[in-house]
Amino acid sequence: MSKRRPLVAANWKMNGTLSSIRPLLASICKGIAEGVKAEIAICPPYVYLGEVARLLEQAGIALGAQNLARHDAGAYTGEVAAAMLKDYQCRYVIVGHSERRTLYGETDAVVADKFVQATKNGLTPILCIGEYLEEREAGETENVLARQLDAVIEKAGIAAFDKAVIAYEPVWAIGTGKTATPGQAEEAHAFIRLRLARHDDKIADQLRILYGGSVKAANAEELFNMADIDGGLIGGASLQADEFLAICRAA
């Protein structure tokens, strides 16, 4: 049995209104209080961080953000700095999500800068890495994962991973309804852990690696039973209380 405490992080993406998130969080908090052993985090859109922080105050659920700036402060209209997230009691921040890489052109170097900003300011980055379908079909999965990981290790140093989380998210399985088989996911997770172990065995062993890619109540238990899968980064399913709670219980 793994000694790593499972983590289930909800990524709401650009979804929700005040009138929808209040009952959603009330249901999630009630369900978690009834007995979930995994650590739970909620990553809402920026504008709801204050309200979600207030609603989670006594719930034992961590708050996270979906992104952060690569700079400390300054003339960067529309950006949000790590220190600002800390002001709202954020514990986690998602870094390098495939949608940020694909839709907003975030390079490996930009992702590495954001990872450094997070750790420097006492936030725990959830570093997302993963391959496109054509890369998997070309047998390039491990090369892609190695490249994305190495860019961060070179910039931040392996010691920074002592206070980090990795999320393996095959891009072809995000929001598509497709899911990597438990075997495919485990293979990628094991590779990531081995890649880190080349630098530091202890850090590699204790690091939590989440799976993100159309996790649902129906497939969560089978995925989480894999030796190197330590929880999930949950997108669409985290917007439905019953579905999300079933995933949390599976972890």
Image (spheres, rainbow, N blue to C red):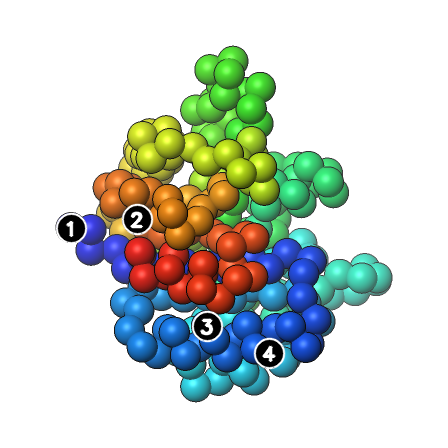
Q: Are marks 2 and 1 in contact (CB under 8 Å)?
A: no
Chain-order first, disc 3 or disc 4: 4
Residue mark closest to the camera, 1 vs 3:
3
Kind of residue indicated by mark 4: Arg
Task: Describe the element under mark 2 as helix, strand or loop.
Answer: helix
Residue 85: in sight, yes or no?
yes
Task: Describe the element under mark 3 as helix, strand or loop.
Answer: helix
Which mark, residue 221?
2
Q: Residue at x 46, y 35 (%)?
A: 179
Residue annotated with mark 3: 28
Instruction: Residue 114: give x, y in percent of width and height.
Output: 61, 52
Residue annotated with mark 1: 1
Chain-order first, disc 4 or disc 2: 4
Q: Residue at x 37, y 60 (%)?
A: 246
- The alpha-carbon separation of the residues under discs 2 and 3 comes to 19 Å
Chain-order first, disc 1 or disc 3: 1
Q: Quadrant of residue 77?
A: bottom right
Chain-order first, disc 2 or disc 3: 3
